[in-house]
Amino acid sequence: MSVRARVIRLVALTALAGAVAVGIGGATAATARLAVNDGPGPHLYSGTSVDVSDTVDGDVYAAAQSVTISGDVTGDVIAAAQTITITGRVDGNLRLAAQTVTINGEVTRSATVFGADLVVARDAQVGNDIVATVATARISGDVGRDLLLSVGDLRIDGTVGGDVTYSSSNTARIADGAVSGTVEHVEPQPAQRVEISPWAVVLGWALGLLYALIALSIVTVAAGLLVPRWLHRVTDELIPSPWRALLVGFVASIVVPFALLFLLVTIIGAPLALAGLLIWIVLTLATFLVSSYYLGRLVLRGRPHPVLTSFLGGVILIAALQVPWLNILVWLAMVFFGLGAELLHLRRLRPWSLPPAPEPVAAEPVAPVTPAAPTAPVAPAPGDDPLAR
């Protein structure tokens, strides 16, 4: 087996061991502190300290702070803990993940270990292979076949019946005659430093600038088409006194986040804080549109089309935001000026207050109508008889 294949096998097996160990922890969390395990089959154990001292006919799954296997297990032992100690006989395999793993018993098959320290004591026996990823490993017992390790410090005082392949920055300390096969030391390759050409940096910066110009210019043009009146009215707050808007935006950028955080930690004010946070994010994002339109108004005097004003100001602002170090000052100015203008415009509109009720108009008094005086009937003149006509 080649060195590359062995290293790949090592990484795959140790990753599998870690995943299995994590899965065991999640599965055993739903069980009792110490499960009642009677009869054959998998036995599950969990708790602060687990000691399996009886004979287990089947596999053992354990998750605890400390796990000790002092009895005989006919199957596999799969465990995750801070310290794991194997002093009994295991007829199957070991799949262990812990800070410290000590094997001082007899393992008929193989052991896969993921942890910080691995100790195979003098009286221990592992029938087949040991595959491990650990910081330190001390092999004082007997290993029937191969050792495949990714280790920081390796010491072998016992016997290894096969080959030893280890990946480490340090040379292992191996006693004479301890390894029956070959010893292969794989030194980790240092990370190669990639030198980036200055032309590549310039090209990347140019492509980023081009992308920003195209993408953000579409946004400014859309704003000039959709909300030109709002942009013009908000930037009107910057025309007579831009420094006032700068001060308002600077103070609001400090006060508002703390106020929202204070509301968020309270139970009653949490919904209001979330709503305020959403509004604050929208206002902050809109500062790019406000600042772009304001720059366009400064450059283009008169009353040009809103789309042209917003587009030209956006191009200037985007280009300034791409200059290293200068972009920090430009971004701060954009946010402070934009927020100040928006807040001053909202204050002028006062959307939170009701409009004053109209005053009732008093009705004009109507002069009383005086009834006309009755007139006396007029007697017909002699000879003016209508019937005589």
Image: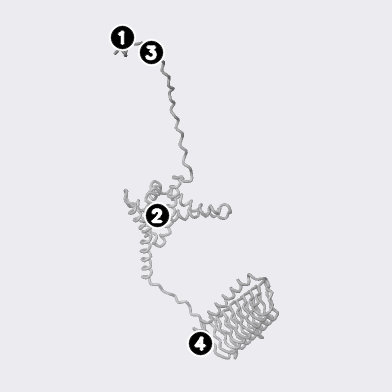
| Badge 1 or badge 2: first in the primary sequence | 2
Position of 18 relative to 354 (above/below): below
* Colour mode of the rendering: one colour
The image position of residue 8, as x and y in percent, is 51, 81
Q: Quick one: 110 or 83, which is closer to the camera?
A: 110
Q: Which mark is residue 289?
A: 2
Circle 3 residue: 377
| Badge 3 or badge 2: first in the primary sequence | 2
Q: CA distance from mark 4 to mark 3?
A: 145 Å
Q: Characterize the local packing of mark 4: few (<14), some (14-19) or many (20 or more) Cα atoms within 10 angstroms.
A: few
Q: Is residue 154 visible?
A: yes
Q: Mark 4 against mark 1, which lies toward the viewer?
A: 1
| Badge 3 or badge 1: first in the primary sequence | 3
The image position of residue 266, as x and y in percent, is 58, 54
The image position of residue 377, as x and y in percent, is 38, 13
Q: Characterize the local packing of mark 2: few (<14), some (14-19) or many (20 or more) Cα atoms within 10 angstroms.
A: many
- Mark 3, secondary structure of its residue: loop
